[in-house]
Image (cartoon, rainbow, N blue to C red):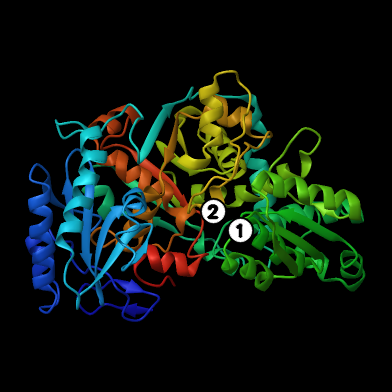
Amino acid sequence: MWKCPKCGREFSRENQDHYCLKPQNIDEYIAAQDEKVRPKLNEIRAVLRSALPEASERISWSMPTYWKGRNIIHFAASKKHLGLYPGGEATAVFADELAGYDVSKGTIRLPYDRELPAELITRIAAWCYGQYAEQGGKDDKASAGGNDMRIQVTAGKGAYNEACSAFSEEAARNALRFHRTVPGYRETPLVSLRSAAETYGVRAIFVKDESFRFGLKAFKGLGGSYCMFRILCDRLGLDPEKTDYNDFLREEIREQCGKIEFVTATDGNHGKGVSWAAKLFGCRAHVFLPAGSVEARRRAIEEAGSAVAEVTDLNYDGTVRHAAALAEENGWVLIQDTSWEGYEQIPRWIIEGYLTLAAESVSQMDGTVPTHVFLQAGVGAMAGGIEAYFLNRFREEKPAVTIVEPAAADCIRRSVLAGDGAAHSVGGNPETIMAGLNCGTPCALVWPILRDCTSFFCACGDSVAEAGMRAYAKQEGTDPPVVSGESGAVTFGALLEILQSDALRAEFGINRDSVIYLISTEGDTDPEGYRRVVGQNGT
C-alpha cells in the first residue's frame, strides 16, 4: 500500500492520482494545480464563463463544473492534457469537428501544447446548456418527470411478490457455505463513502466493491461457480448440503467432471465466471459473445479459465439462442444467467450464487438497514435476486429499490411501461458502453419481482455511467477511490444526478436519514475503455 504524504490516504498503486483535499471553489481548484497548467485552466474557464452566462460555477465530482439545475459541463487538469467533459451525447454530435482530438464518449482531451479551440468549446457548451439546463428548468431544479436525456425515471409499485421467497436467507447461507471453500475466496469490501454522504446530505452511502472478487474483477464468478457446483452435484449424485469444493479435488470425481462440457452466451463477465469455474472443476466450456464485443473481453474470458470464447454476429438474445441450440445439438450443458419457460433451475442456481454478496453486505453493515438500494440490470437476474433477498431480510423496514438500465436497452423499464404485466424485448442491436447491461429481454424467473416490488426504474445515457466512473475514481474528500467499469458505475452516476436535484430527491424520498446501498459490479474489465473515460489506469 502507498500512503500519500500530504493527506494520509492509502492506495494500492504508488503515486495514485487523487485529490488530497476537496477544493471548495474553482479558484481553489486552479490554485492547487501545477503552475505550468494554470494559464490553460484560466483560459478554458473564461471561455465557459462567456458561453454560459446564466450557469453557476461549482465543484462537482471534484471537478470545476458549470451548473444550471444540473451539471452542464466539467473540466479538469490531467498530467498531459486538459479534460473537457460534456457527456457522450455532445461528443457524438460534434464528432466530425473533434476528429483531430483524442475523444472517447463524453471526454475530450485537449493537449496543453496546442491552442485551445475556444470557438468549438463555446458551441459545445451552448449545446449542452440547451440539452440539459433548459430541461432542468429556469428555477435551478432538475426535472423529476423522467424526460431528461441523462436519466429517465418511472415510478414502480414498490409492493411485495411471493416470488421473492425463493431467494431467501437460507439460499444465501447455502451459497456462502460453498463459496467459503473455493480457493481465493474472501469478502469483497463494503466501502463507506462518508465524505460523499456528508456533501450530499444523507446518512450513509455504502458501495459493495466487486472488483476484488476471485481476481475476476466482477461478481459473476459467484453465480457461475455455485451453479456449476449444483449441476455437478446433480450429475454425480452428490448431496450439495454435505458437499463442498474440496470434494471435487478427489481424483475419481475430477475424472468424471472432465467429461462434462458447458456452453453459455455472455456480454462479458458471466462468460468469464463460467470459464473460471470450468477450470476450477476440471470441465470444458464454450462461451459466445454478441456482435460488437471488444477483443479485450473475449480474451479475458479465455485467460480466466478453460473456455474457448468466440464473438458472433448476433445480438445478445440471438447469441443466447445460438448457445442453447449448440447445447442441444452436442449434449453440452447450457449454463445461462437468464430464464424462459422450461429453463429455470439453472438460472435459479446462478441467482442463488449471487446472494453471497448480499449476505456479506448485510453482515458488513452491522445492523444498519438501507433505506434505498440501487441495482443495475441487464436481464435483471442479479438485480431481481438481490432485490428479493433484501426485501425478505428487511421485511419490516423495506428499502426502496431502484433498477438502473442503459437507455438504449432498458427492457425492464419498457416492459413496465407497456402496462400489460408481461415482459417485453428490446429489438435490434442496441449500442451502449454498458456492455454488461446490454440485454434485450428480462429474465422470466425474476420478472414478477422486478415488476411488482421495484419502487423506481431509471434509464440512463452513457454519460451517466461515465460520470459515475470518474466520480468513483476521484472521490469526494477522504473517500477511497473505487475502480468501477461502465456497468458497475452507472448506479453511482444515477444516484449523483438524483442527489443534486431537489425535485428528484423528493420523488425518491431521499433525506438526511437515508442510507443508500450500491454495488460496483465490475472493475476495469475493459482496461482501454476505462482509461479513455477516466483518464488513468485502474488497479
Q: Secondary structure at mark 1?
A: loop
Q: Nearer the viewer, residue 407 or 215?
A: 407
Q: Is residue 343 above or below residue 173?
A: above
For this view, does 8 lie left or right of residue 151? left
Provide residue 460's location: percent of width, then percent of height. Answer: 41, 42
**Residue at the spot x=63%, y=55% of the render?**
291
Q: Is residue 94 above or below residue 43?
A: above
Whether residue 25 can be seen here = no
Query: Please, what is the three-letter code of the amino acid marked with disc 1?
Result: Gly
**Residue at the spot x=63%, y=37% of the render?**
441
The residue pinned by badge 2 equals 435
Determine contact: label 2, label 1, CB under 8 Å. Answer: yes
The residue pinned by badge 1 equals 268
Q: Nearer the viewer, residue 264 or 90?
A: 90
Query: Please, what is the three-letter code of the amino acid marked with disc 2?
Result: Ala
Provide residue 378's location: percent of width, then percent of height. Answer: 57, 44
Whether residue 447 can be seen here = yes
Q: Nearer the viewer, residue 119 or 514?
A: 119
Provide residue 90's location: percent of width, then percent of height. Answer: 31, 50
Q: Secondary structure at mark 2?
A: helix
For this view, does 407 lie left or right of residue 419? left
Specify few, some or many for label 2: CA neighbours under 10 Å numbering under 14, 14-19, or 20 or more. many
Which quadrant of the figure has residue 532?
A: bottom left
Q: Quadrant of the N terminus?
A: bottom left
For this view, does 233 lie left or right of residue 377? right
For this view, does 181 lie left or right of residue 261? left
Provide residue 379's location: percent of width, then percent of height. Answer: 61, 41
